[in-house]
Amino acid sequence: SQQGEEDPQALSIQEGENATMNCSYKTSINNLQWYRQNSGRGLVHLILIRSNEREKHSGRLRVTLDTSKKSSSLLITASRAADTASYFCATDGGSNYKLTFGKGTLLTVNP
Amino acid sequence: DVKVTQSSRYLVKRTGEKVFLECVQDMDHENMFWYRQDPGLGLRLIYFSYDVKMKEKGDIPEGYSVSREKKERFSLILESASTNQTSMYLCASSPTKPSGSDTQYFGPGTRLTVL
C-alpha cells in the first residue's frame, strides 16, 4: 500500500528559484525521510525528520512535518541545474525496518 | 561512507531463465531490501531481511525469492524470468535503530530486461 504521495508529480523552475515539494501520508510514523534520485541511478538520502520534530534544515534544504495533517514539505532554496532529479518521500508507518516510498516529484531546474 | 554494490548495472535475460541479482553492503547493516522501480508506480518493496537467514515478504513478492546466507550479501532470485519482470531493481541496506526505521543506503540499481 502506498504510504507517501508527493505533489506535484512534476515541477519545472528556473535556476535561482525555490522549489517546494509536498508529501502526504496516511498512517502514524516514527519518522519521514526525503530521498533524491538522479536519472537511472540509485536513491540518495537527503534528510530525516522525526515525528516529534516540526522543522529541519540541511544546507539549502528545509523540511517541515505536520503530523496532525499527515503531511511534509521539502523546500530547496536557490536551486541549481544540478538539483534536477526525482525527489521521494518515504515513511515508516511505525515499522522499525521498512519504508514505503511515494511515486516522486520530478524536478527540472532550467539554467 | 556506506557502499552498496550490485552485481550488474544492465542485464538481459530470456523468458524462463533463472536470474540472480546480487547485492553487497560494507557497513555491517542488519537490514537489507530489494525494490523494483517502474514508471508511474514508484518503488515497491519485493523482500527484505532483518538478519542473516531471516526474510520477510514485501508488497510484491510473487515470482521472486531471496537468500541471505551472510550479513553483507542479499540475493534476489527470479526462478523463471518473465517479461513483466523487466524493471529497475534497487538494493538497499540500513542499520537497526530503536527509534524506528533509519536511513536506507541504495546501490546504483540493475536494469533488467527480459526478452
Image: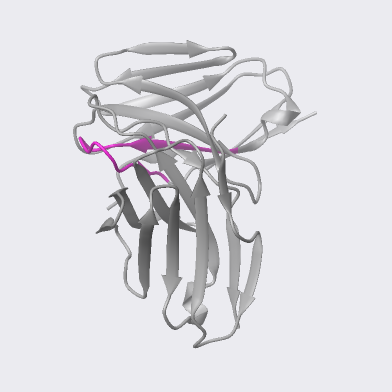
Vertical relation: B27 (above or below) A66: below
Vertical relation: B28 (above or below) A72: below
Q: Is residue B31 left or right of residue A26?
A: right
Residue B114 included in the magenta stretch of the image: no
Quick one: quadrant of the C terminus of chain A?
A: top right
Vertical relation: A47 (above or below) B39: above
Q: In percent of the image, x 20 and y 37: which residue is there?
A: A27
Residue A40 place in picture, x, y as percent: 65, 51
Q: In percent of the image, x 20 and y 35: which residue is there?
A: A94
Number of labels in the image equals: 0
For residue B113, what is the image quadrant? bottom right
Q: In percent of the image, x 35 and y 69: which residue is there?
A: B65
Looking at the picture, tell me which residue is in the foreground, A20 or B14.
B14
Q: Is residue A64 left or right of residue B17?
A: left
Q: Residue furthest front?
A: B70
Residue B38 place in picture, x, y as percent: 50, 60
Q: How is the image coloured?
A: one colour
Q: Is residue A60 left or right of residue B104?
A: right
Looking at the picture, tell me which residue is in the foreground, A7 or B18.
B18
Q: Is residue B74 left or right of residue A70?
A: right
Q: Residue furthest bottom?
A: B16
Which span of residues is magenta-colored? A86-102
Looking at the picture, tell me which residue is in the foreground, A52 or B20.
B20
For residue B60, what is the image quadrant? bottom left
Residue A92 included in the magenta stretch of the image: yes
Can residue A107 be seen here? The reply is no
Can residue B65 be seen here? The reply is yes
Residue B112 place in picture, x, y as percent: 58, 68
Q: In percent of the image, x 24 and y 22: which residue is there?
A: A67
